[in-house]
Amino acid sequence: MTELPITPEPLNDEERATYEWQSWVPGFGEQGQERLKGASVLISRVGGLGSVVAYELAAAGVGKLILAHAGNVKHSDLNRQLLMTHSQLGKPRIESAVRRLEELNPHIELVPVAENISEENAERLVGEVDLIVDCAPLFEERFLMNREAVRQSKPMVECAMYDLEAQITTIIPGETPCLSCLFPEAPPAWKREFPVFGAVSGTVGCMAAMETIKLIAGLGETLASKLLTMNLRTMRFHSHRISRRTDCAICGA
Amino acid sequence: MIVTIQCFAQLARAAGGADHELTLDEGATAQEALRAFAEAASEETRVLLFTEAGELQPTILLFLDEEPLLFSEPAPMRERSTLFIATPIAGG
């Protein structure tokens, strides 16, 4: 696995104690934790997927999280967007997310952005981090993130869910298929709202967090060039090999 | 021979379930299997799979026994092969 250019940050005694259990993981250790502390991650939307990704990365001690999400908390968010609470209904989602994450880990840097990814902010936000986790509901946002990830050679963990099914892959520009290799255009029939349980977004969100940790720490094998699909109705998991498109308009494989 | 069409996400919902068994002639290709499946399926399913011109939607991913498959390259199926068809999904 290609090592990301991250400058490790030394730990203090409190951090050593906080992350003790994960530092026992073979191949991770204090060096891995120092890399997490020195890393920065952009999470595009902290909804059903992104809430869980952010929560796990904050718990694991990733040094800086940039969270991009517009809008206010609605009742229909609360079955899966675990950083949103009843007490925050009608208030900005990003405030609710930051409040919950600060309760969990007050020692990491949180950068709230009360906007979704757009042409106006994508280049700048991607430029401020080491890697990205794409949790957005709209393909326009996803394609923007993908384009910027490829332009700036930043890895992107790509996760998605629907009903009791989910999928995840890890995009490493120049090495693996990008999102546009998989889907060269927006799907004609995708709807912004769809059936899903929070346990489904939570499952794949945890996997996305683990992929992110592995990429930062150089731990284990990632889903580079593999698409993991899961059906939680039947508990069938498939790891499909995926290939770059030679005619991809974005990564030009 | 009997093969399985396995639908993912939106497609499974449109097709009334994930798994669909098909009986095909020996030597039939995955492309023929997909056409046969679509012809017997609902209109919603057909629209997800094919354009009005009869071309495969460019956002469809195909995997034959876990390996990626290009619709433009005919691939023979074997007894008990599985053709996995994925439509794009996102977050929310």
Image (cartoon, rainbow, N blue to C red):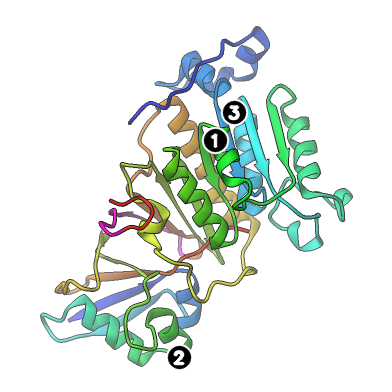
In the image: residue A116, left or right of residue A167: right
Q: Amino acid under label 1? A: Gly
In the image: residue A103, left or right of residue A176: right
Closer to us: A252 or A205: A252
Q: Residue at x 54, y 64 (%)?
A: A164
Q: Amino acid under label 2? A: Glu
- Label 2, label 3: how many angstroms apart (C-alpha)? 47 Å
Above or below: residue A212 compared with residue B55: above
Label drawn at residue B43: 2
The answer to whether dots 1 and 2 both sit on one chain is no
Find out whether residue A77 is within the magenta segment: no
Place of residue B53 in the rendered image (x, y in percent of width and height, measured from the top left): 34, 88
Q: Residue at x 68, y 25 (%)?
A: A108
- Label 1, label 2: how many angstroms apart (C-alpha)? 44 Å
Q: Residue at x 49, y 32 (%)?
A: A213
| Badge 1: chain ID | A
Label drawn at residue A60: 3
- Label 3, label 1: how many angstroms apart (C-alpha)? 23 Å
User: Dot 3 lies on which element?
Assistant: helix
Closer to us: B73 or B75: B73
Place of residue A70 in the rendered image (x, y in percent of width and height, measured from the top left): 73, 52
Closer to us: B68 or A86: B68
Place of residue A144 in the rendered image (x, y in percent of width and height, measured from the top left): 52, 53
Q: What's the magenta region? A: A234-247
Q: Residues within 10 Å of mark 3 (few under 14, many from 20)?
A: some
Find out whether residue A244 is within the magenta segment: yes
In the image: residue A247, left or right of residue A99: left
Instruction: Give the quarter of the image for residue B46.
Output: bottom left
